[in-house]
Image (spheres, rainbow, N blue to C red):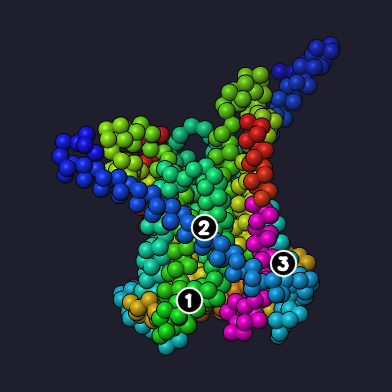
Amino acid sequence: MSRFSTPAAAARIRQRKTVDRVFVVLMGIAAFIAVSLLVILLYRIGSSGMRYLGPDLINEFPGRRATGSGARHALFGTLWIMSLTLLFTVPIGVGAAIYLEEFNRRDSWFKRIIQLNIANLSGVPSIIYGMLGLAIFVPFVAVLAGDARSGKTLLAGALTMSLLSLPLVIMVAQEALKAVPSSLRDGSLALGATRWQTIRRVVLPQATPGILTGIILAASRAIGETAPLIVVGAAVMVNSVPTGPFDSYGVLPLQVFNWAQRPQQDFKDLSASTIIVLMGILISLNAIAIIMRMRAQRRA
Amino acid sequence: MAAPIPNSAGDRAAIMLRSKRGNQRLIEQFIQGGTFSATLVSAFTTIGIVVVLLLNSLPFFQQVSVGEFLTGREWQPAGGKFGILPLVSSTLLITLGSAFISIPLGLMVGIFLAEYAPRKVRNVVKPALELLAGVPTVVYGYFALTVVTPFLRSIFPTIAPLNLLAGAIVVGIMTLPLVSSLCEDAISSVPRSLPDGAVAMGATKFESIKDVVIPAALSGIVASFILAISRAVGEVMAVAMAAGLMPNLTANFLDGGMTMTAYIVNTSKGDLPRGGIDYFTVFAVGLTLFFITLGLNLLANKFVRKYRQVYS
């Protein structure tokens, strides 16, 4: 370091370089911690959950003892909630995105308010949606069913989850529509196609992979959320598989919640097995999303 | 005017075309109207939330004064004591504790991903974080009960079986991916020319990050912190499972407690009689929670918009 005029300057440079190196190591350690947290979590669930991971888990109902207990009702309840939620939230969410990105492209106060509103809705805690469902959808469904006691059914749960996942679907679908080059739209319109013809035949096919990603994200939320469903009446003590939207229901995360809180280790392990089923569904859904994203990128 | 009589093939084609155009216009209007109503659903959701929370907490505030609700130090709805401070203190401790984990760790991971990570490492870390973000919150509750609390007990033998510290730790882990991915986005959106200029002037990479990149990305980074805090305030299952259901005005992380969200979910499960005081109390607590998170989210939005304006 003789290039530097004074030993003090050389020392300062050495010190700065040391700080630089320490910093890199620290950042690396932080990333390592984050990844190891996931590994610990997965390892813990895997090692405890193997014990009860078997056909009983999807064939049986919850019982007094962990052995022979299953979460069949909850598995079907989760699938019902997911399907009904998508049935409501996909047309409304994609429709809203189409309106905001295709029919009403100009910036206006109306659009700005709607956009701000959607951003804020996505930050509202999920349990607040549950309370909205409790106050509105539960009595509404009870009237539909013609029975004052039967408001706490699949339909009320799915309507609640639909509102909950709506902002997500709208935002992701908007991004997908924004990514379609306007030259395609302009070309189609210039050839005499109407707005809707352009959307249906030109824009939507291009935006489909992105929109599907949004749908899968919404499905994941509908599967993983618990709190709002507890508020609108998902139940633990269900010993039958729901057969229609007016049936009472349980869901997998609620079963995890219930079993994890039992004092006996057996039930905690059963809870871990249920987590494996739950996360298995989530991971396969996300794998589909990733494959679709890669396909879309390859085509682009 | 009399309708023209179709007397040639050309005329017939023109009429068919005209009626087809009319149909198309109808379809256009129908679709536009339909998508417009879909857009309105989001507006009605917000209105619905505000109206439902206000209307249903009104009967509560007719019985309990706002002052008593906000400053009371005891929460025993069965005994007629409706001071929300114990619930707020639990929520606050869990939120602060989780921020101590998610903010420094998330920022560091964000910097690592944006500035240092080689492609191969990125390809491991990013999906891992995405998976961590996608884990349902009950799973974190399970993790708190079966891993974090037993571990904590080996360090603090006097810790309560259900305690705020375990809740804070799992919520911190849960919100870490949110902070790291938003920080990474904010840092990546800083034009490369800024830190490159600093390095060209003789700054080390650390100095270019500390003095150039982070100040430039600050609003996005701050927004990620606020959003993580807002998520922690609104988190339900993990905190209910980890910290328990005992209202407790405490500043000690080793105690159990009950957050606002845990009260709501615990009271509204099962058969909550519609129109009773418990029913209205749930909504009063929900209203408080809603205003806290709304304030935080609006603040975060303000920061996000600031950094978008500067660099894109």
- Distance from disc 3 to disc 2, alpha carbons, whole Å, reads 29 Å
Residue lying at 51% horizontally and 62% vertically, measured from the top left: A37
- Distance from disc 3 to disc 1, alpha carbons, whole Å, reads 32 Å
Label 3 or label 1, whichever lies nearer to me, is 1
Q: Residue furthest bottom?
A: B79
Left or right of B95? Residue B197 is left
Left or right of A83? Residue B193 is left
- In the image, what residue type sits under mark 2? Val
Which secondary structure type mostly characterizes the magenta part of the structure? helix
Q: Which mark is residue A75?
A: 3
Which stretch did the figure color magenta?
A258-286
Label 3 or label 2, whichever lies nearer to me, is 2
Left or right of A161? Residue B21 is right
- In the image, what residue type sits under mark 1? Phe
Q: Residue furthest front?
A: A2
Residues tagged 3 and 2 counted as in contact (Cβ below 8 A): no
Quadrant in which residue B269 is drawn? bottom right
Please tell me how crowded label 1 is: few (under 14), some (14-19), or many (20+) other residues with Cα within 10 Å: few
Please tell me how crowded label 3 is: few (under 14), some (14-19), or many (20+) other residues with Cα within 10 Å: many
- The answer to whether any part of residue A276 appears in the image is yes
- The residue that disc 2 covers is A35
Query: Up-down: is A254 above or below B75?
Result: above
Label 1: chain?
B
Quarter of the picture holding the C terminus of chain B? top left
Q: Position of residue B281 (x, y in %)?
A: 45, 75
- The residue that disc 1 covers is B151
Q: Is residue A269 magenta?
A: yes
- In the image, what residue type sits under mark 3? Leu
Quadrant in which residue A196 is drawn? top right
Q: Between residue B30 and residue B239, name the one nearer to us.
A: B239
Q: Is residue A80 magenta?
A: no
Quadrant in which residue B4 is drawn? top right
